[in-house]
Image: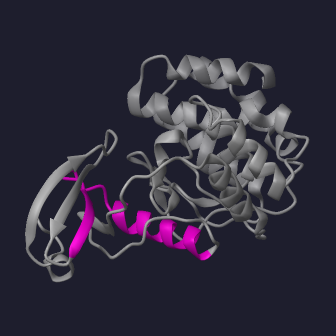
Amino acid sequence: MNYFDEYTGSIVSSRSLHGGDINEVYHIKADRGDFVVKTNKKKYPGMFQSEAHGLNALRSEGLPVPDVIAVSESAILMPYYPPGKPDMAKAGRQLARLHSTQHETAGLEKDNYIGYIPQINTPAASYADFYRVHRLEAQLNLLRLSVDERKKWDSLLNRIPEFTAHLQKTSLIHGDLWSGNLYHAQLGPLFIDPAAYRGDPLADLAFTELFGGFGSAFYSAYREVLSVSAAYTEVKSFYQIYPLLVHANLFGGGYYQSAIAAAKKYM
C-alpha cells in the first residue's frame, strides 16, 4: 500500500483513519516516521494535486494546515499529527488572521473539489459573477431541475450583487469549513481538507454554523482579531445555500429542501 516508499521507507504497520465519504485514509508507521496517506481508487482527476495546492496557499497566508510531503494522481502523503485537546479560541484567531489578508480578485489559480464535485476557480474581477456562475449555478445545473423548478432560483441569482455589496476585497477562505475539517492536534488546531478560493470570509463563517457550529469561544476569539461585517446577519443563510446544494448533489436526501428553505427569504 506504500505509494511513497522513497519518503517513508518500509511500512511497519498501518491502520485506517476516518476519511469522510470519499477517500481512504491511513496512519502508517514506517522506517522514517509516522505518516498519513490519503488515497482514492476512483481517480478523480487532479484531486490530490488540487488539495496540495489549497493547503499550500492557506499555509502561505498563515493558516495552520498539514504539511504536504508528496502528492501523486492517486494519493497524498502528510505527516501524522497526534491528537490533542481542542483549542477553539486559538482556531478562531487563526481563521480571522487568514481572513485579514485581502486580495483584488475572486477564485484561485487552480480548480479543486468540494467533496468529489469539481469547483471551477477561474479568477475573476467580479466576485458576484464568480459566485453566481461557479458556485450556485454550477450546483443547480448538476441537480437537473425541471424548468419550472429552476426558474424559482432566478430571483435569488439576480440579487447576488446586492448580497455581496459589502465585500470590497476578497480573502482566501477554507471553503469547506465544517467541524470535521478542523483537526485538534497536540501542536494545536489544524485546518484540513480545504476547498479553498478567494472569496467572502462570511462564507466561511456561515459554513461553520451550518452543521452545529464551532462554539462561542471560536466566534468570540475571531471577533477579537477581525470585526465581522454587519451584513453577516442578513447573508448568513444566503451563504449556507451553496454547501446545502453541494450536499444535495453528493448525498441527496432532504438537502435540496433545506437549500430551498434557506433561499426563500431571498427569493
Residue at image position (27%, 71%) is: 72
Question: Is residue 152 at least partly visible in the picture?
Answer: no
Q: Position of residue 186 (x, y in %)?
A: 45, 58
Q: Is residue 235 magenta?
A: no
Q: Position of residue 159 (x, y in %)?
A: 82, 36
Question: Is residue 107 at least partly visible in the picture?
Answer: yes
Q: Is residue 43 magenta?
A: yes
Magenta stretch in the rendered image: 33-60
Q: Which quadrant does the C terminus fall into?
A: top right
Left/right of residue 73 with respect to residue 250 in the rendered view: left
Snapshot quadrant of residue 250: top left
Left/right of residue 38 with respect to residue 104 in the rendered view: left
Against 165, residue 74 (above or below) is below
Of 132 and 77, which appears nearest the observer?
77
Snapshot quadrant of residue 95: bottom right
Residue at image position (61%, 18%) is: 148
Residue at image position (68%, 54%) is: 130
Against 149, residue 243 (above or below) is below
Q: Which quadrant does the N terminus fall into?
A: bottom left
**Residue at the bottom extreme of this rendering:** 6
Residue at image position (62%, 38%) is: 214
Count every numbered label the image shows and give the total.
0
Left/right of residue 200 with respect to residue 18 in the rendered view: right
Snapshot quadrant of residue 81: bottom left
Q: Position of residue 86 (x, y in %)?
A: 53, 47
Left/right of residue 5 with respect to residue 226 in the rendered view: left
Q: Position of residue 145 (x, y in %)?
A: 52, 24
Of 98 and 104, which appears nearest the observer?
98
